[in-house]
Image (spheres, rainbow, N blue to C red):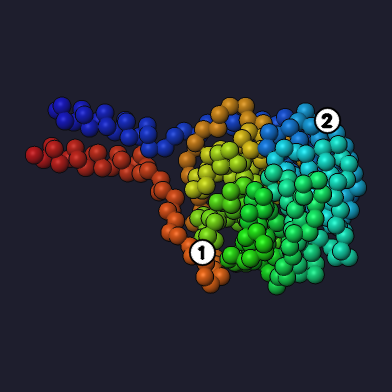
Amino acid sequence: MRGVQALLIAVFFLTGIAGPAMAAPAFEIAWEKTAGDTVNDVAISADGSTIAVLTGSTLECYAADGGLRWEVPGGHARHVGMSEDGSAVVIDGEDIRAYNGTGAQVFRHANGYFAFGVGISPDGSCIAGGFDNESLMLFRKNATGVFLPAWSVGIDDDIIALDLAENASSITAGDRDGMLLRYADGGRLLWRYDTGSSRLSCSITSDGSYIVVGADHGAASCINSNGKRLWTAISGDGLPGIGIAEDKPLIAVGGESVTLRSPGGEVLDTVSDKPAHALAISGDGRTVVTADNGKTVTLYRACEEAPVTGSTTLPGTPARTTTVPEETAPTETEAASSPPGAFSAIVSVFAAMYCIRRH
């Protein structure tokens, strides 16, 4: 009888640890604004104190409380990037432009070609742009604070998405053909990853260890530094907003809702059940700014520590990855599998009980 009692205690214990209960949302709306034009992209500083909103006609910079700091014409830009400290904001469009914390223009590059993608390194020392003459250019700040051309490479198709690791030690770019490309500093191509999508968004950690790419068929994928896909999640049918919080690291995935995931793909929390085609997340993961498919911009702040709520990672179909010769890729450990569910534990325990009674 004591054995049976012990097993019953084990049943309650296992059912308690097999899967944590869903908690109340850990984020709340801090403010929400209606822009004067359709919102194309958003960016946020690492501490969440500075927010950039790029619309079809303007670039607007807001404080954490929602107050407008400055506003300039957008120049038909589609993408905005920001340094970690919020002191530099860059946009693409008819040319590449950078603005400082007061809205003064500090850099402009016009070569007669339209810039479809732009990015700035977390430390603000480098700016990269992809132009519609099938070229990728990097500009590096010199000792006097002036951005000068560092290198340029030709590519097979126009770049439409771009992000930089710290000091441009590596650059991730997506082209119109659906290829995600990883470059080393100097413009050397490391690998290609075929997403199968004609529209892309991408974000990279400052050390280059993780890359998140969003595709226009509703997929968001996490890829390691060697071009190996770790997981894919589906969130709607359109291009999902994506972002990475550096301190955790923590991955934000938009689409029909906004969720936070671990680098292994586990869903840690739900920020919002509203659509987000563009988003950005602060370095500590506690502030998220989103834009829907219209003119609405929403800022969310964490109101409690985000609890782990279980894993709903979708396996996805493996994509084709082509590694450039002479590059070696060390073996990576796949994400750990989830623990057995409560039902399986109960079945196992009662099977053991049956065996005891038989003996």
Counting from the top left corner in percent of width and height, residue 235 is at 61, 51
Q: Residues within 10 Å of mark 1 (few under 14, many from 20)?
A: few
Is residue 345 visible to the viewer in this orientation of the structure? Answer: yes
The secondary structure type at the circle numbered 2 is loop
- Residue underneath mark 2: 67
Residue at x-position 87% and y-position 40%? 103
Query: Which residue is at the front of the view, 120 or 193?
Result: 120
Is residue 37 visible to the viewer in this orientation of the structure? Answer: no
Residue at x-position 55% and y-position 32%? 306
Question: What is the distance, in whole Å, between disc 2 and disc 1 at their CAs?
Answer: 44 Å
Quick check: marks 2 and 1 in contact, CB under 8 Å?
no
Horizontal relation, residue 91 to residue 203: left or right: right
Which residue is the extreme one toward the front?
143
Circle 2 or circle 1, nearest the eye: 2
Counting from the top left corner in percent of width and height, residue 1 is at 14, 28
Q: Residues within 10 Å of mark 2 (few under 14, many from 20)?
A: few
Q: Amino acid at mark 1?
A: Pro
Horizontal relation, residue 201 to residue 61: left or right: left
Q: Is residue 96 above or below residue 145?
A: below
Q: Name the mark on residue 318.
A: 1
Residue at x-position 70% and y-position 72%? 156
Q: Is residue 197 above or below residue 350?
A: below
